[in-house]
Image (cartoon, grey):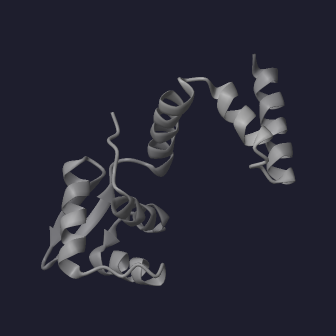
Amino acid sequence: MVQQISDAELEIMKIVWGNPQKVTLFSYIMDGLAAKGKPCQKNTLIVLLSRLMSKGFLSARKIGRRNEYTTLVSETEYQTTQTKNFLNKIYEGNAKGLVSNLIMGDLLADEEYEELKRLLEKGKEKQ
């Protein structure tokens, strides 16, 4: 089961998930946070990375004086788990309630609405 992570930890994971390389260096994460306007102290980042490792999101391999971080949980896997948790918590597992709220609450742009319709029709064809 994929655990919940804090907003700060999620920002780090987004940077790691967005890295085209298989491994991510500490400096890449520091630079990524700064580029997002969320600079972080070195010690704070070390603590957050340690938490992500203990939660099973990252593994680290020490190469000399630097760590190379590798993801253990994909972004899609995390999103799916969090979506299921949200759906169960807010809508008691009722996906129709979520979709209805998106539509009735005018929370979808026209192109998003059309894309959602296409996805639903495609899913219907598979049954």
Query: Farthest front residue?
Result: 105
Left or right of residue 32, residue 99 in this image: right
Left or right of residue 121, residue 80 in this image: left
Query: Farthest top residue?
Result: 127
x and y percentages locating residue 21 in the rendered image: 43, 68
Query: Farthest left residue?
Result: 64
Which of the 4 image quadrants contains residue 101? top right
Which of the 4 image quadrants contains residue 40? bottom left
Quadrant in which the N terminus is drawn? top left
Left or right of residue 32, residue 42 in this image: left
**Residue drawn 45% across the image and 62% down it:** 14
Work out whether 2 lies above or below 52.
Answer: above
Work out whether 123 lies above or below 3.
Answer: above
Which of the 4 image quadrants contains residue 8? bottom left
x and y percentages locating residue 69 in the rendered image: 28, 64
Comparing 35 with 60, the one in front is 35
Work out whether 69 lies above or below 95.
Answer: below
**Residue drawn 31% across the image and 59% down it:** 70
x and y percentages locating residue 124 in the rendered image: 79, 22
**Residue drawn 76% across the image and 21% down it:** 126
x and y percentages locating residue 112 in the rendered image: 79, 49
